[in-house]
Image (tube, helix red, strand yellow):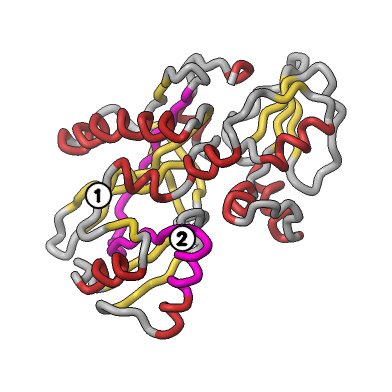
Amino acid sequence: MDPAPRRVWFLNLDADEELRHPGAVNPSAAMVDRCAQLATRLEGLVPPGDVWFTPGMSLPVARGLTGLAWSPTPHALRTLAKTGARVLDAPAWEALRAANHRSLSAGVGQSLPGAVFARSRAELDAALRAGACSGVWLLKRPWSYRGGGRLRVRGTSLDASGARWVEATLAREGGVQVEPEVARVEDHGLHGFLSREGEVTWGALTVQEVDAFGAWVRSKRADESLLRDDERARWELVKPRVVAGLRAVGYHGPFGVDAFRWRGDDGGVRYCAPCEVNARYSMGWAVGMAGRRVDLDGA
């Protein structure tokens, strides 16, 4: 028998749309279906007996329960309040947006040759002119997700269509991540939890299976011997920088850091960490954090 529910979870897996387009609270039918499908594959995030729902589902009655959101956006907090749940103190909206902006990941450190977070057209053009090690640049919007919001650029300059894409992104989102497109060999994830008081709990490294577009498929715990010495040393540099970046913008709560191995033209395997920082729960968060003690109800 499942225990009595303690929490109600609003699994707003469309939260990135709201981050990129503040006020976007009406997901498409396709997005509603995708959220419902992904929610069943969260690999232990919601404890047995707890109540959960996704965008498009009827609101449960949750008086007396603690309300948690996949990402505590304004819409998510309003929705949880409608269920009657006790809604926890959440990071300020601007803190949440800043914590998920690619400039934060870039500030932790760029790991790919020639990679830069460009805040102007001049900075972006200068990066492109240097030439990508692979011959192809990958441009990413600051709040893109699931492999979307990207532009591939061959050569060292933009065509007319690419220029329009870049100008619109710079104006609307404050920058563009510029990095070479490389052959990814293996994707990793490291998850954590930052308390309101600033204390951090780290989980175990996970190996992530992703599809051809970079979207998550499943996660598993990594063997302790997986990392090379140089990769382990890279994480020791990255971890305190991630926490410092999240604290600096005023974020607290769950987070994850993506990384990957990639193969160069010479056949050598190199390491990119961080690839990006996600200041929210993530699909493999519960896998990496299993056995770690964190106070979700006091977040």
Residue for point 45% across, 72% down? 167
Mark 1 element type: loop
Q: Position of residue 147 (x, y in %)?
A: 48, 59
Q: Earlier in the sequence, mark 2 or mark 1?
A: 1
Please identify, in this view, whether the residue under mark 2 or under mark 1 is nearer the observer: 2
Residue located at (81% from left, 44% from top): 57
The three-letter code of the residue at mark 2 reads Arg
In the image, 125: left or right of 228? right
**Magenta-span inclusion, residue 191:** yes
Residue for badge 2:
141
* Extent of the magenta region: 165-194
The verdict on residue 281 being magenta is no
Q: Quadrant of the N terminus?
A: top right
Q: Nearer the viewer, residue 1 or 248?
A: 248
Q: Which mark is residue 111?
A: 1
In this picture, is 75 found above or below 141?
above
